[in-house]
Image (cartoon, rainbow, N blue to C red):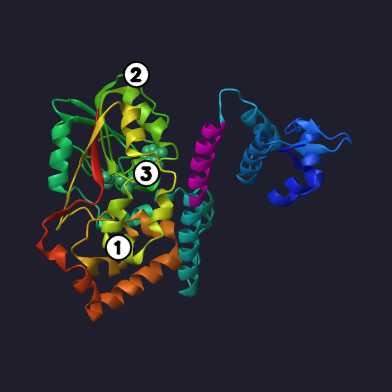
Amino acid sequence: MEGHLTVGRVAELAGVTVRTLHHYDAIGLLPPSMRTAAGHRAYSADDVERLREVLAYRRLGFGLGEIANLVHDPATDAVAHLRRLRNLLRAQRDRAAAMVTAIDRELEARAMGIRTTPEEQLRVFGAQLYDTIGSAYPATRRTEPRIAARIWAALGDARTVLNVGAGTGSYEPPDRAVTAVEPSAVMRAQRPAGAAPCVAARAENLPFEDQSFDVAMAVSTVHHWPDPIAGLQEMRRVARRVVVFTYDADNTGWRERFWLTRDYLPEFADLLVGWPSMADLTRAIGGRAEPVLVPWDCTDGFFEAYWRRPEAYLEEHVRRAVSVWTRVGPQAEQRAVSALREDLSSGRWATRNRDLVALDAAELGLRLLTA
Ligand SMILES: C[S@@+](CC[C@H](N)C(=O)[O-])C[C@H]1O[C@@H](n2cnc3c(N)ncnc32)[C@H](O)[C@@H]1O
C-alpha cells in the first residue's frame, strides 16, 4: 500500500465520487494498479497522473470513449498531455472571453432598446476571439514602417510569401506575391480591396504542399494559436524560410520593466503561463531571435505601442483593438484603467516613469525570429 492512495482519499482530493472511480475502473479507463489484501482499490502516483488527465479532458467536454483513446495512446506521454490540455484550455478561455464580449454587446444593445438579430445571437456560440473583437481592430492597428522594414529585410529575396494569421493585411510586403491565411471571417472581411488573396485556415493545418513558398511570415499572431509549436512547424514545412514577429514571454524581466503590466495589469502574466519559451519557438523553426525595439510613436497600436503615451490606454477604442484587454476580463481592465487615470492626473505616473521621456525606443520583449 505504501505510496498508494485509497479510493476514498483519491475521490476526496479530486472532488469526484467513489462511484465515479469505480465506474472508470469497470470500463477499463482507469483501473488502479493495486488492490489491498481486503480487495480495496489503491492508486499509485502514475494512476493519479492518469486520473488528472481523465478529469481534465472530461472538464473540456470530451466523452469517456474519446478520453480512453487519448489517455491510452502510447505515443503521448504525460508532458505531451499537459501541453495539449493547456492549449485546449487556453482556446476554451479565449472562446469564453469572446462570448462575454458578445454578451456585453447584446446587453448594451438591449439597454438601448435594440433587439439583436437571430444570426447575431447564434454567432456567439461559434465565436472565435477575433470574430468578436476583430471589428475594433482597424481603428488603431496598421503597419508600423520601422518594424515593417525589419520584417521585409528578413524576407530577403523571397518572391512568394505566405502570411499566416494575416488579419487585415498589415505588414504584407507590396512588392512580392503574397498569399494570406486567416481563420476569422470578421478579419478576412476587413482586408482592404486589392489585398492579397486570403485562405480561411489555421496555422496548425496549412492547406499547402511542402515547400510551396519562399518564405512564411507571421506577425503578432503566434500567441493566439492553440498550438504554436505545431503552427511554426507547419510554416517550416510549407516554406523554405520562416520570419516571425512575436514576443519573448519567458523573460519576466521585461514584463517587470513595462510599467503597464508591472504597476497596473499584473494579470497579463497569467496569459503567458506555460507559453513556449523563446528556445522552444526558435527550435521549432530551427532559427534565431533578435530584439525589436518599439519606437515611442509606434503607429501599430499593439499592447506595448503606447509605452511613452500612457493616456492612450485610457481610450476604449485603443484597448478594444488589443486582445489582452478582453482576455484579462472586464474587472481587471476597469481596475487597471481607473488606477492609471488617477496616477496620470496626480502626477504619480510621471514621477515613477520620468526616465522614459528621454527614450526614443524601448526594449519590451518583442522579437524577430528568422530561419
Ligand atoms: C493580433 S492579430 C494580427 C494580425 C496581423 N498579422 C497583424 O499584424 O495585424 C492576430 C490574428 O491571428 C489570427 N489567428 C488566431 N488563431 C489563429 C490560428 N490558429 N492560425 C492562424 N491565425 C490565427 C486571428 O484571427 C487574428 O487575425
For label 1, count other residues whose C-alpha is less than 10 Å away and answer few (under 14), some (14-19) or many (20+). Answer: many
> How far from the left and from the top, in percent, is residue 87?
48, 41
Q: Which mark is residue 223?
A: 3
Amino acid at the residue labelled 1? Leu
80 falls in the magenta region: yes
Q: Earlier in the sequence, mark 1 or mark 3?
A: 3
> How far from the left and from the top, in percent, is residue 284?
35, 29
353 horizontally vs 130: left or right = left
Residue 174 occupies which quadrant of the picture?
Answer: top left
| Residue at left offset 19%, top offset 44% | 292
For the residues labelled 1 and 2, the Cα–Cα distance comes to 42 Å
Disc 1 target residue: 260
For the residues labelled 1 and 3, the Cα–Cα distance comes to 19 Å
Task: Classify the position of ligand 1 by quadrant: top left, top right, bottom left or bottom right.
Answer: top left
> How far from the left and from the top, in percent, is residue 170?
23, 44
- Describe the element under mark 3 as helix, strand or loop: helix
Disc 2 target residue: 210
102 horizontally vs 290: left or right = right
Label 1–label 2 contact, CB within 8 A? no
